[in-house]
Image: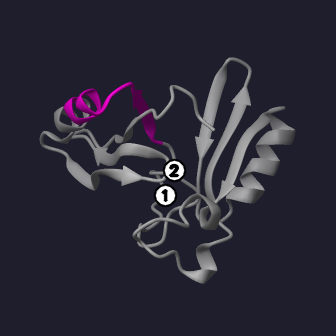
Amino acid sequence: MMNGNGKEVIQFYEKALNAEIISNKILGERCENSDYPIPAEAKDSVGFALLKLGDSNLMLSDSHPGQPHQVGNQVTICIRTENNEKTKQVFEALQDNGQVIMPLQKTPISPFYGIVTDKFGVMFQIYTDIQNKIE
């Protein structure tokens, strides 16, 4: 999670890590049908980017409006599941003695998506993959 400098980060990683940009959606494009209006000043922020680094994927976005940026939370573990039941199971297991940051809900990128910090302070994004691929 970046603090409004996601575009700069993408350009830096593309050059420094020889990363291939697979996807780069701005927040205004990615969430335009959301039930939560995006403030005008945030619409040009990175909503979701996927970079390919060898055999690994790096996903990043700018912090969404209303979610404070906190140093130390820039890196999160993403868990992608194949169905909503598995997403719910993993989310509920991780929230035990942890903190729900964003409850499981439908989003423009997934039918079931949530963010939770586990009891050890590790932040996770858990989501159901729509088509077993990321656009």
Secondary structure found at label 1: loop
Tag on residue 131?
none
Estimate how packed mark 2 is, as few (under 14), some (14 to 19) or many (20 or more) residues with alpha carbons within 10 Å.
some
Residue furthest left as drawn:
97
Distance of label 1 from label 2 (alpha carbons): 6 Å
Instruction: Residue under label 2, please give it.
Output: 74
Q: Is residue 11 above or below residue 86?
A: below
Q: Is 53 placed left or right of 65 in the picture?
A: right
Q: What stretch is highlighted in magenta?
A: 76-89
Q: Which residue is drawn at 71% across and 49% down?
A: 24
Amino acid type, callout 1: Val
Q: Is residue 5 above or below residue 75?
A: below
> For this rendering, which residue is in front, 115 or 99?
115
Q: Is disc 1 surrounded by few (<14), some (14 to 19) or many (20+) residues within 10 Å? A: few
The percent position of residue 79, horizontal first and vertical second, equals: 40, 31
What residue is drawn where x is 62% and y is 35%?
58
Provide the residue designation for mark 1: 71
Say if mark 1 contacts mark 2, CB within 8 Å. Answer: yes
Amino acid tagged 2? Gln
Q: Position of residue 117 (x, y in %)?
A: 29, 46
